[in-house]
Every structure is written in structure tokens, then in C-alpha cells.
Image (tube, rainbow, N blue to C red):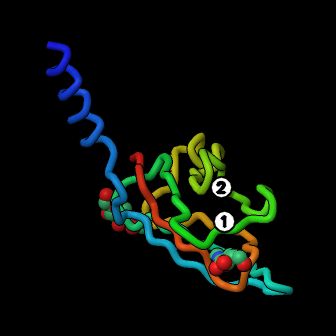
């Protein structure tokens, strides 16, 4: 009985959360560079058909921050995992066709690699 309930709960979880889905596009441009550091502006666009309340952004590799403040307009969940700032979520999310930009300064000359997971509509 418990097992069945757990299975049911899991199914609902899978239905409501698209894992690493592609309804967000990610692009970044370099906005500065100096002494082994580089600054980047990342644009997340909701390319889906529904507002996105929240999403998890995973820095897959190459994100080396000298200090936590070196990434802004995203909130830290756990090391290398970020999510939308609360003001987006509180305002009903990121509408389809709209974008959110955030920035970071990496301790290097190349951009970090990001992917988006756990998109909540
Ligand atoms: C948002 O999605 C709706 C369908 O739900 C679509 O009709 C509309 O064109 C989309 N808007 C943008 C700006 O992509
Ligand atoms: C995102 C990025 O620039 N990655 C670099 C960050 O800095 C470290 C250390 O210099 C590099 O190894 C990464 O390539």
C-alpha cells in the first residue's frame, strides 16, 4: 500500500516537473575581462508556452567565483545550483516569450557551462 502511494507520488512529481527540459534557452555574452577574470551576462528566455514560476540552473563546469557576490540576479540553492530570484517567482514567474538576465564574474577567461533543470510552470 505504502509502495503504491509512493509510486503514485513519484508519477505526479514527474508530471509536474520537467527534468532538464528545453523550454528555456540560455545564451551568454562577455561584458568584460581583466587579469584572468571575465564578466558574463547570461540571458534566459522562456521559449515555452506557459509562464515559468521557477527553474534550477546548474553550473555544469567552469564556474569559479572568487566570492558568492560574483553572481547576481540568481539565488544560490547549493554549490553550483541556482534558482530564480524570489521577485520573479512572487510576480507570477517568467512569462513565455520574456527573458531574465543575470551576471557573473569568473576567475578565468572563458564562460561557465550552464544547464536548466526542474522547470516549474
Ligand atoms: C505564449 O504562449 C501562447 C500559447 O500558450 C502563445 O499563443 C503565445 O504566442 C506565446 N507568447 C510568446 C510571446 O511567445
Ligand atoms: C567560466 C570560466 O571562466 N571558467 C573558468 C573559470 O576560472 C577557472 C580558473 O581560472 C578556469 O579554469 C575556468 O576555465
Q: List the single residue furthest toward the right.
A: 35
What kind of element bears circle 2? loop
Q: Residue at x 19, y 27 (%)?
A: 8
- Which residue is under mark 2? 74
- Which residue is under mark 1? 102
Q: CA distance from mark 2 to mark 1?
A: 7 Å
Location of residue 33 in the rendering, given as x and y in whole percent from the top left corner: 79, 86
Q: Is residue 87 above or below residue 35?
A: above
- The numbered disc on residue 11 is none
Q: Residue at x 39, y 67 (%)?
A: 47
Position of 73 with respect to 77 (left or right) is: right
Mark 2 or 1 closer to N-term?
2
Location of residue 78 in the rendering, given as x and y in whole percent from the top left corner: 60, 46
Label 2 CA crowd tier, 10 Å (few <14, some 14–19, many 20+): some
Position of 32 with respect to 55 (left or right) is: right
**Mark 2 vs ligand 2: CB below 8 Å:** no
What kind of element bears circle 1? strand
Ligand 1, seen in the image, is in the quarter at bottom left
Amino acid at each position: 500500500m505504502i509502495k503504491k502511494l509512493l509510486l503514485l507520488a513519484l508519477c505526479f512529481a514527474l508530471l509536474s516537473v520537467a527534468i532538464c527540459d528545453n523550454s528555456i534557452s540560455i545564451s551568454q555574452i562577455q561584458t568584460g575581462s581583466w587579469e584572468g577574470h571575465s564578466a558574463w551576462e547570461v540571458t534566459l528566455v522562456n521559449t515555452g508556452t506557459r509562464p515559468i514560476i521557477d527553474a534550477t540552473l546548474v553550473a555544469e563546469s567552469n564556474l569559479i567565483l572568487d566570492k558568492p557576490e560574483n553572481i547576481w540576479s540568481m539565488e544560490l540553492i547549493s554549490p553550483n545550483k541556482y534558482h530564480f530570484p524570489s521577485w520573479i517567482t512572487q510576480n507570477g514567474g517568467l512569462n513565455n516569450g520574456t527573458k531574465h538576465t543575470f551576471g557573473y564574474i569568473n576567475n578565468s577567461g572563458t564562460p561557465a557551462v550552464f544547464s536548466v533543470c526542474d522547470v516549474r510552470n
